[in-house]
Amino acid sequence: MSHYAIIAPPLYSHVRALEALAQPLLARGHRITFFQQAQARTLLRDPRSGFIAIGDEERSPPLAHTLRLMAHPAGTGMFRLIDHLAQTTDTLCRELPAAFARAGIDGVIADQMEAAGGLVAEAMGLPFVSVACALPVNRDETLPLAVMPFSYGTDARSRKRYQTSTRIYDWLMRRHGAVIARHARAFGLGERRGLQDCLSPLAQVAQTLPGFDFPRRLPDYFHAVGPLRAAALPPLGEKQPLAFASLGTLQGHRFRLFRTIARACQQTGIRLLIAHCGGLNVHQTARLRDDGARTVDFADQPAVLRRASVVITHAGLNTVMDAIATATPVLAIPLAFDQPGVAARVEYCGIGRRLSRFAGHDAFAESLYDLLTDEEYRHRLLPLRAELERAGGAARGAAIVEQALEKRQPVVRGSIC
């Protein structure tokens, strides 16, 4: 059996998805090893996967600091975050070749959000597969980038907006782009400037759905397999008059936003459960209880959504995929990264509504009332849920990965059942 490396940013949701993808490969006898800075070891749950620390811990940006910047990606913090991402890619590109050689790596599973995985694999002649745990970074000039909040349009004004915003984004990311370009030249790979230039020519796996996207062009070896989860969801039960609110593992500290949501739910007359992922203190959770909300650090999100009648989310792709799996209408409040793009797709597909985090509780109450009373949202979710059930998830994704890495040939859509 083969030994596969997994290269991913040290983010909870990305590691969970890639661990789920790894489980069928482990069951087939392959070895799996994650490579990242030492502090990322704590993110792993499956003891069957190995971990090799990369980089000098004293010189690498502290993971806790990077996560704080990700939780507050605004102003000068955005530039500091980009510097951290550039340093991480630089370290991985410098140290992975020797680490792969020592470990006897046969193939690489590379998260789209970390360019080093694809760059180093290609430089060493190793087969690799790209995995989109967030919205895909594959570019299409007819679409806005995933990080942009724009709705889909085909008119000249929309196209110009997409092109202008792409140039601005590339300028903001120039420090990271320079690191990618420098290592690509050093590896003899030619011109590379961004994440979109570091994707696999063999197979690309995404935990989204064709039905949950704008019309777009993607390579024949791009496979949308739906959410990468360890197990299938049990059958749905009856929906209850309950709103579930979660802003993800990085944004659970936003007390003011949670309080606006709580007051809107009070105004609408619906029970509210908040999962803040440890972001709130005892005083804050007490104040939210005064506003009628129940709070928990973490919740079994799929289980809660099987009962909830609406989910209020930062528009994280994982949460929206869980909402599709459970046919739960979505109130999307995008905060950062690809969340504006996810929220735009929620609106485009008609499965929910989008609000600014700066909206007042009256606007939240109006949106919640609409989601709770208009059955069309749930009806539009049902075909997407059926598509998700057919997509294959982690099992199909693992079969695609295995075929691509073992045969070293492109795996085109339709060749894996």
Image (cartoon, helix red, strand yellow):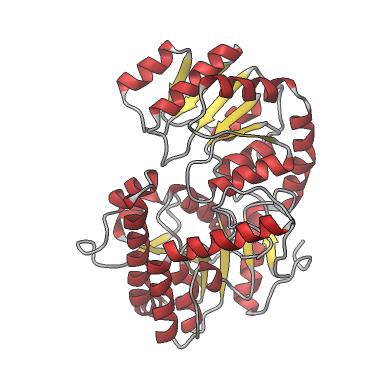
Count of numbered marks: 0
Residue at x 45%, y 13% (from the top left corner): 291
Residue at x 42%, y 53% (from the top left corner): 47
Task: Please state the horizontal and vertical placement of residue 284, each as a whole percent of the image.
Answer: 34, 21
Q: Dividing the picture into quarters, in which one does residue 184 lie? A: bottom left
Task: Please state the horizontal and vertical placement of residue 209, each as a whole percent of the image.
Answer: 70, 51
- Figure quadrant of the C terminus: bottom right
Q: Pick whichever, 269 or 75, lies toward us.
A: 75
Q: In the orientation shown, which residue stands out farthest toward the bottom?
A: 188
Q: In the orientation shown, which residue stands out farthest toward the left?
A: 58
Q: Dividing the picture into quarters, in which one does residue 216 lie? A: bottom right
Q: Pick whichever, 195 or 10, lies toward us.
A: 195
The vertical placement of 381 against 416, above or below, is above
The vertical placement of 334 against 48, above or below, is above
Task: Give left or right: position of 381 versus 133.
Answer: right
Q: Pick whichever, 408 or 364, lies toward us.
A: 364
Q: Pick whichever, 336 or 380, lies toward us.
A: 336
Residue at x 39%, y 50% (from the top left corner): 43
Inspect this view and state whether residue 231 appears: no
Residue at x 19%, y 62% (from the top left corner): 58
The vertical placement of 103 against 71, above or below, is below
Task: Please state the horizontal and vertical placement of residue 173, each as a whole percent of the image.
Answer: 43, 64
Q: In the orientation shown, which residue stands out farthest toward the front?
A: 157
- Figure quadrant of the N terminus: bottom right
Task: Please state the horizontal and vertical placement of residue 356, each as a whole percent of the image.
Answer: 53, 35
Task: Give left or right: position of 155 versus 189.
Answer: right
Inspect this view and state whether residue 18 appears: yes
